[in-house]
Amino acid sequence: MTPVGIVAEYNPFHNGHAYQIKCIRERIPDAAIVICMSGSFTQRGEVALLDKWTRAKMAIQGGADLVLELPFVFACRSAQDFASGAIRLLNAFQIEVIAFGAESDELGYLQQIARETKSPLFQKMLHRYIQEGCSYAVAFEKTCHAQNLNVSDDMLKKPNNILALEYLRAILQLENHTKLQPLLIQRHGSDYHDTALSPLASSSAIRKALTAPTIDWGKISRSLSPKNFSLLKMFPEKEIAKTERLFQSFLLRLYTSRNFPSYYGYREGIENRLYRTARAVHSREEFLQEATTKRYSKSRISRLMAYALLEIHEDFIQQADVIGPQYIRPLAMNQKGTELLRKYKKNIKLPVITKLSRYRNYIRSEMKESTKPTIGHQMLSYDILATHIRSLATEMLNLPDDYMHSPVILL
């Protein structure tokens, strides 16, 4: 059994994701597919459309064997930090192969770029562009051109290519402390931003269809397997989350909190710009459009809003980035995933959380006489809070939370 990792959001799981898993099994017949999946919030700072347990169940029904949660403090970050946190978690679980999709089909080419961007000269120039006011994506593109790297503009504007580069860069960061080998699966189907439904529709297209005033289930059915379509259709519409519903909660925080300068990502008085913008708009989408600048992209502003809602502070993120994920948390598994978890559990240095109350007791014993929570305890607390806040983006308000859910087991 060869453990193969995939980093994903599955918001929601669709035929394109199933195709990737199918390709992996064709190349590695004895693969045990382990998914490192974001939880209640996505990398772009939005709440996940469906809860993390439902999305994990869809992944198992779509061919995966085990789904692990990527902690919020890494899941809701820039592409660089998202990839780094996920790779470190999969490495801690002793994954041997990391599979990822990309628009490019040249792994060697991507690996060469990843190695070249790791050089001190590249990093120095990259940070200089950022200090001059460029966003990370723009600064990365400018540095590639300034260093005469053989990288086309089109390649750097493809989201899966960018993530593929970040996965490869994260593997290089681990140097001799990993046995992870990359496996590139060329991406097929609709572009990330394509909103048209088709058999290989993007997650964006499916989300748009599910949040429309009238849901066209016939069209959506083409983009999912029969099992996952049935699960999705049975999912209560009142439990579908819409990030727009959190906008007023963010405004309340913006208007009343005095802690913004200490929140993660709030630099150069950006909160003042957000305050002025909020007074002149009428929706979250309008707010994002007006608040965006050359340095602060739409996705970055969206993440800043999430950090304010959870009150995540700069010093905590700095500590979390140093030590990485502090626990393994299964969300769903099948028989093979159960066997893999049982086999690896003895050798994994991080605690494996299947019951939240047991982990809380573990944390208390670790703290001993100290009254200060550990980084792992705080990391988990943010996952729990993120789940609570996601429920505010639904019509249900009080949904089952992390204390009420155990991993979904499909045998």
Image: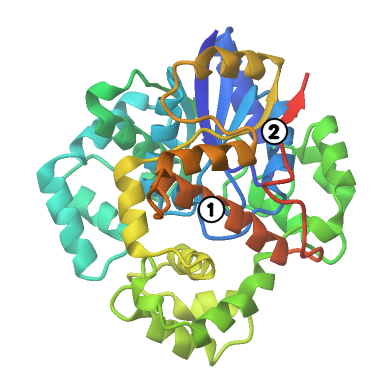
Question: How far from the left and from the top, in percent, is residue 94?
Answer: 43, 20
Look at the numbered discs 1 and 2 and tell me whether their residues touch, using CB distance below 8 Å. no
Question: How far from the left and from the top, in percent, is residue 57?
Answer: 73, 34
Does label 1 or label 2 sit earlier along the sequence? 1
Q: Is residue 131 above or below residue 269?
A: above
Residue drawn at (62%, 43%) of the image: 190
Label 2 neighbourhood size at 10 Å, few (<14), some (14-19), many (20+)?
some
- Which quadrant of the view contains residue 262? bottom left
Residue 381 shown left or right of residue 237 in the figure: left
Q: Nearer the viewer, residue 291 or 200?
A: 291
The amino acid pointed to by label 2 is Pro
Residue 40 shown left or right of residue 409 in the figure: left
Please say whether residue 387 is visible from this viewpoint: yes
Which residue in the structure is indicated by mark 1?
Answer: 381
Which is more foreground, mark 1 or mark 2?
A: 1
Label 1 residue SS: helix
Residue found farthest to the front: 369
Question: How far from the left and from the top, in percent, is residue 170?
Answer: 32, 36
Which numbered dot is residue 407?
A: 2
Question: How far from the left and from the top, in percent, is residue 367?
Answer: 41, 44
The amino acid pointed to by label 1 is Ser
- Which quadrant of the view contains residue 131? bottom left
| Mark pair 1, 2: CA separation | 18 Å
Please say whether residue 154 is visible from this viewpoint: no
**Number of dots carrying numbers:** 2
Residue drawn at (87%, 45%) of the image: 233
Q: Is residue 166 above or below residue 290?
A: above
Residue 172 shown left or right of residue 202 in the figure: left
Label 2 residue SS: loop
Identify the image quadrant of the C terminus: top right
Residue 176 shown left or right of residue 278 in the figure: left
Residue drawn at (50%, 45%) of the image: 71
